[in-house]
Amino acid sequence: MKKVRLEDIANKMGVSKTLVSMVLNGYGDKNGIKKETQEKVIALTRELDYKPNQMARSLRLGKSNTIGLIVADISNAFYAKMARNIEDECNKYGYNLIICSSDEKDAKESSLIRMLKEKQVDGLIISSTLVDNSEIVVLKQENYPFVLVDRYFPEIPDTNFVIIDNYKSSYKAVKYLIDSGHQNIAMLSISPSHLTSVKDRNKGYFDAIKKANINTDHYLHCLIPFESIEQSVEASIERLLKYEKKITAILAVNQNIALAIIKALKKFKIKIPDEISVITFDDLPFFELLTPSISAISQPLDVISFNAVKILIDEINSKGSSRKKDQVVIPSHFILRESCKQLKTKKT
Amino acid sequence: MKKVRLEDIANKMGVSKTLVSMVLNGYGDKNGIKKETQEKVIALTRELDYKPNQMARSLRLGKSNTIGLIVADISNAFYAKMARNIEDECNKYGYNLIICSSDEKDAKESSLIRMLKEKQVDGLIISSTLVDNSEIVVLKQENYPFVLVDRYFPEIPDTNFVIIDNYKSSYKAVKYLIDSGHQNIAMLSISPSHLTSVKDRNKGYFDAIKKANINTDHYLHCLIPFESIEQSVEASIERLLKYEKKITAILAVNQNIALAIIKALKKFKIKIPDEISVITFDDLPFFELLTPSISAISQPLDVISFNAVKILIDEINSKGSSRKKDQVVIPSHFILRESCKQLKTKKT
DNA sequence: TTAAATTGCTAAACCGATTTAGGAATATTG
DNA sequence: CAATATTCCTAAATCGGTTTAGCAATTTAA
């Protein structure tokens, strides 16, 4: 069973493929094609189950109606959720999504960007891990439509991005802990930590403890290598437990770190929150199910996705004319759960 | 900055685009192109940062090097993990992935299949939700390469599929509970339940309790509507708690149901496993972190993905000649954790 | 010295759609 | 009745690659 082409329809009807194309694209009236002819075309199209070859169409139109999404790892709950939201938003505009995982690897991300461009995607949404951001700079120079999410590049001006207010979120969470009476607060952050999201979260933590004039020992701020989260977190926790002063709270820089922390504390039989309070960036449905449930800084992924796609489509549609870039910072939600212990009542 | 085309390279060098194309595709020697010329082509290609338009290439070659993946919901941890494994496998073969979520909706899945065909994907991997499977039948008639995962259609013979042994997994899990002394074992299954995976899991449950000659009251087998898992599970649990006999174990048909069960039991302050033991299909990293940790029937997603992609690529490569279909059934792993209580020592 | 073989390359067709420019037949106008 | 306008449609170019068929110049063979 051979595929049905536009030409097959045209031949079978004894008209030109120009006519068929016009009718199928809704330009029948505009080009003065007889109603009767139009109906016959439509009918035959149905009958033969004609499916236009989008590849051919895209080549001619210079538009693939496909968007590329690059995240660190699609199997990560955070990105999976984001991908789903982005997928839905894209569908609304008639776009499809090619999803790729960069594994936080520079080389892989760069080659993914190049590959997606070769595939002629109309735009990119990137949660970039790049240190060497030259590929992004090229995108910008080429005026290629793209939006950064979750992380951005302060050193590249005038790029679209959608992020949460990482600094403020971090600062507020730590401030909450301080106000609850915690004096020795650790943060388990991640390395490489050139990512703006991580940097801002780190800075929020440091600024909050500095401002409160409590223990600002850098020993309390641990960098966990991305490649070996589980073991490194366990080692760090072990180290922290031996610290001269009693550490009573930990801030996790993301959900992966949080999972590892919970696992390690379980292993060392440290009770949350009685001995150590825990707050994490990123919320997972199951943080609520744990006993105790885990306090989280939740990113509104639907809002982020909505904005990212909207901006990207806008960028695509206004290609050529250089459009003013959108830089959206969305507030996060602090969700207080059982994992935080009040050491004293909050000062008024 | 205009895009560089094959022709631009050719013009700039004063050769034909045929030559350039041949060289870039590695057919330079075969066509007797001078080494010197070849080198010049390669050099110029680098210099101009030429990126072939894959759309044009695909159109000519009738091959997009793209695969479509349809799952119920990519934000679901199970499918996210599967998608990632499939992505990696595809990359090994030089393919990309368009991922789509069907939301377990017939109409949406059918239209996704049609859409992906229009996009000229070279093959499909589908975790199908279809009751009306006519779109699958069409695929088969057209000899369109596809592989079913997780679920298949017994009524459509000779289709590729990769699944786990749902019946046996379910049977064994329930048998384990029975052997541990449980007499009143509930199962929270899902509706619509036309899916082979669900049907087989249900059958395994029923056969195990029938064989053991214990309570086979159908009241213990609850169907949770897909659209309202949380509320329905809660209602079902409430009902089960009022049952004339004391229910001491529950089998969850998948991770979503399990999450809802854990939540509901937490709400009703029922202790796992002291009052009720829990086993679930599908393993999540966090099942291990819960207190108590949750026993699970784990699907080896890497093995499933590996097979699915391998079969699909094989199918794509042997297109035309009708290839013998692969039907792979992979054993699952039962992971015993703290959520199962021994009511008596296992009989010998 | 001429026919045959080899070397190194190219023109043009093709994939399947969209679009531009225009043509033939009929209807309307002056 | 000729000139113009309208109606309905089409041939051919185009998008950017790959591939087929073949050509001109040189080398080898007879």
Image (cartoon, coloured by chain):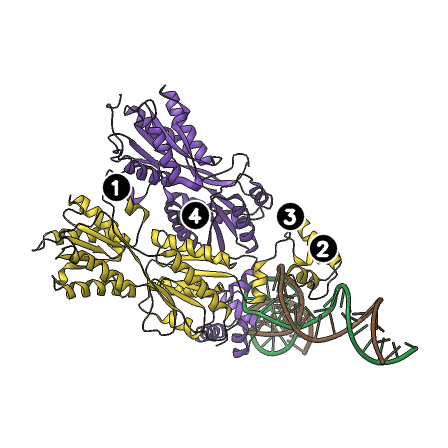
Chain colours: A yellow, B purple, C brown, D green
Q: Do labels 1 and 3 share a chain?
A: no
Report if the CB atoms under discs 2 and 4 are less than 8 Å apart.
no
Q: A111 or A284: nearer the eye? A: A284
**Residue where numbered disc 2 is placed:** A39
Q: Work out which residue is located at the far top of the displayed protein and give it.
A: B213
**Disc 3 or disc 4, which is closer to the eye?**
4
Q: Are marks 2 and 4 on the same chain?
A: no
| Label 4 neighbour load within 10 Å: few <14, some 14-19, many 20+ | some
| Label 2 neighbour load within 10 Å: few <14, some 14-19, many 20+ | few
Q: Tell me where residue B345 sits by quadrant.
A: top left
A235 with respect to B75 (left or right): left
Q: Is residue A194 above or below residue B183?
A: below
Q: Which amino acid does label 1 sit on?
A: Leu
Q: What residue type is labelled 2?
A: Glu
Q: Do labels 2 and 3 share a chain?
A: yes
User: Whole-Å distance between the Cαs marked 3 and 4?
Assistant: 33 Å
**Residue where numbered disc 3 is placed:** A1
Q: Can residue A97 be seen in this view?
A: yes
Please tell me which residue is depicted at 36% across the width and 30% down the height of the picture: B239
Report if the CB atoms under discs 1 and 3 are less than 8 Å apart.
no
Secondary element under disc 3, as helix, strand or loop, is loop
**Residue where numbered disc 4 is placed:** B73
Q: What residue type is labelled 4?
A: Asp
Please tell me which residue is depicted at 46% across the width and 57% down the height of the picture: A89
Please tell me which residue is depicted at 25% across the width and 32% down the height of the picture: B273
Chain containing mark 2: A
Q: B45 or A248: nearer the eye? A: A248
Q: Which mark is residue B290?
A: 1
Chain containing mark 1: B
Q: In this view, does B184 lie above or below B22?
A: above
Counting from the top left corner in percent of width and height, residue B261 is at 33, 37
